[in-house]
């Protein structure tokens, strides 16, 4: 609990570095994230095991597979084949580089990271399955279907290999957030079906450490209970309130609106400095 609170304090402090809160792009609070994840800013390595791994920006593969399919089974097979083919080429190049450099190849992270255009948006792929908008009921099922498909592809793995829903880096997701359809609680819920956490979420500038602490505590509990890596990049925007438009001048962001945070300070036992442990579900030992 002390570590979670310290992360909340850092997020609030870093948010004030730039007038638009942009500095928190470079800080992630990690929960159950092992070394070897290639996605910035969660990447680090164990000193005794220096290696390299590749992170892919491959949300467009999911969009293409879903858009050309006449059934879920066809979409699933198309995506498995596409990922497997791309992964094989990347792995071959990486193994050759490892042999030349003497630095071990750790694997591939095919988490379908987005670029802020409609055709390179994982949320677009979710909606082309038949979802009216990400944030409505059916979203969890769409996310689970696509990530279960990713699980079936065969390739050397490193890192998350999960579901990226970065609000400011995904065109369609930013639109859902701006329309008020998507909430922070929704994003945390989707992390339960193999997400990667809460990413690039614009929050009110007056968000307190106590409010951030409560969100991060939920994220950490989910990561421990499900034994999965989750991370949070929360971005309080100075001077902005929930519903205000964001104004980032950054090629890798799709502007949206500041999202409301349904969080209040915790009290009593949950507000202390203890360390408590959660066993993985199904493993009481």
Image (cartoon, rainbow, N blue to C red):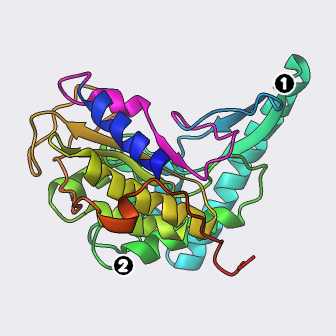
For marks 1 and 2, the one nearer the N-term is: 1
Instruction: Indicate whether 114 appears above or below 97.
Output: below
Task: Give the distance between the C-alpha atoms of the residues marked 1 and 2, in whole angstroms.
Answer: 44 Å
Instruction: Indicate whether 103 appears above or below 166.
Output: above
- Could you tell me which secondary element the residue under label 1 belongs to? loop
Kindly tell me whether residue 78 is visible in this rendering. no
Marks 1,2: beta carbons within 8 A: no
Kindly tell me whether residue 219 is visible in this rendering. yes
The quarter of the displayed image where residue 244 is located: top left
User: Is residue 244 covered in magenta?
Assistant: no
Quickly name the residue at label 1.
103
Q: Residue at x 29, y 39 (%)?
A: 235
On the image, the x and y values in percent for residue 163 come to 51, 58
On the image, the x and y values in percent for residue 11 come to 34, 37
Quickly name the residue at label 2.
138
Q: With 2 as the anchor, is 279 left or right in this view?
A: right
Which residues make up the magenta segment? 17-41
Q: Residue at x 29, y 64 (%)?
A: 267
Q: What is the quadrant of the C terminus in the image?
A: bottom right
Q: Nearer the viewer, residue 208 or 236?
A: 208
């Amino acid at each position: 609990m002390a570590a979670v609170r310290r992360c909340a304090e850092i997020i609030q402090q870093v948010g004030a570095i730039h007038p638009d809160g942009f500095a928190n792009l470079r800080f992630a609070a990690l929960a159950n994230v092992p070394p070897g994840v290639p996605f910035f800013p969660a990447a680090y390595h164990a000193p005794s095991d220096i290696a390299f791994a590749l992170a892919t920006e491959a949300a467009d593969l999911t969009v293409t597979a879903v858009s050309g399919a006449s059934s879920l089974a066809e979409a699933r097979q198309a995506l498995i084949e596409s990922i497997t083919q791309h992964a094989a080429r990347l792995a071959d190049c990486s193994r050759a580089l490892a042999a030349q450099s003497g630095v071990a190849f750790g694997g591939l992270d095919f988490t379908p990271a987005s670029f802020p255009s409609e055709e390179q948006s994982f949320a677009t792929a979710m909606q082309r399955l038949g979802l009216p908008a990400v944030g409505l009921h059916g979203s969890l099922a769409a996310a689970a279907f696509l990530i279960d498909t990713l699980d079936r592809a065969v390739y050397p793995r490193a890192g998350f290999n999960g579901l990226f829903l970065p609000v400011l880096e995904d065109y369609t997701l930013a639109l859902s957030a701006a329309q008020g359809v998507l909430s922070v609680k929704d994003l945390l819920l989707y992390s339960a079906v193999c997400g990667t956490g809460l990413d690039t979420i614009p929050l009110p500038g007056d968000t307190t450490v106590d409010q951030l602490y409560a969100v991060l505590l939920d994220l950490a509990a989910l990561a421990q209970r499900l034994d999965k890596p989750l991370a949070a990049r929360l971005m309080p925007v100075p001077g902005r309130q929930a519903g205000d438009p964001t104004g980032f001048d950054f090629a890798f962001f799709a502007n949206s609106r500041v999202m409301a945070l349904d969080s209040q300070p915790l009290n009593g036992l949950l507000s202390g400095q203890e360390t408590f442990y959660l066993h993985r579900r199904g493993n009481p030992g």
